[in-house]
Amino acid sequence: MTKEDIIRKLQDKFGSDLEVVQNNQPEPFVYISKDKYREFCRHVKTDPELDFDFLFQLAGVHYPMPSAGSGSSDERFEVVLSLSSHAKIHRMVAKVKLDIIDPEIETISDIWAAANWYERESMELFGIKFLHHPDPRPLLLVEDWEFGYPMRKGWTGPDFIPMPEK
């Protein structure tokens, strides 16, 4: 399938819950609404034409303020998925926006097993809650870590080293 074919198929299925980001990259880049996130993930994996069988990245991102030219005015977190299909030889990037105050979303570790550790990493480092996650234990930080979420912008914990002034 071409990039345009994938986008068209997803727009037909998800309508206004899907926002396509126009870019010059070879793979589609979309935002999916938080309400349709799990349905979207299950669909792109199980639809025989899409067959996105491999999740090769899931990452949390913290946007503390809008960036110039982004078209967005909201402080937020995002979860970013990078997907590929071995059989169909295509890729896709999908994102979902989360609230800054209480960033939470359903786990997809039952859809792609690889999401398990990626979600645990985002829980620890960004404070994004993955609801119904099967194993929410710490993965990278010590069990009794009490110093917040070190990947959030503006974090200043005990191991923080500020950049020198120019």
Image (cartoon, rainbow, N blue to C red):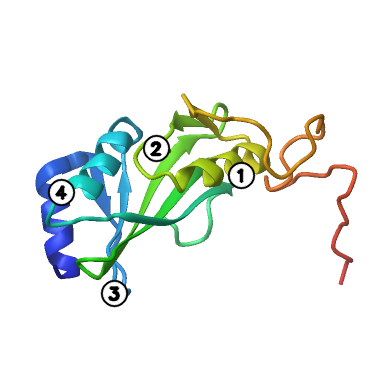
**CB atoms at circles 2 and 3 under 8 Å apart?**
no
User: What amino acid does circle 2 point to?
Assistant: Ile
The residue singled out by tag 4 in the image is 47
Which label lies toward us, 3 or 1? 1
Cα distance in 3D space between marks 4 and 1? 28 Å
Residue 3's place in the image compared with 100, above or below, is below
**Percent x, y of residue 31:** 33, 49
Residue 163's disc number: none
Q: Earlier in the sequence, mark 1 or mark 2?
A: 2
Which of the 4 image quadrants contains residue 155? top right
Q: Which residue is mark 1?
A: 121
| Callout 1–callout 2 Cβ contact below 8 Å | no
4 or 1: tag closer to the N-terminus:
4
Of mark 3 and mark 1, the one earlier in the sequence is 3
- State which tag comes first along the sequence, 3 or 4: 3
The three-letter code of the residue at mark 1 reads Glu
Distance Cα–Cα, label 3 vs label 4: 21 Å
Residue 26's disc is 3
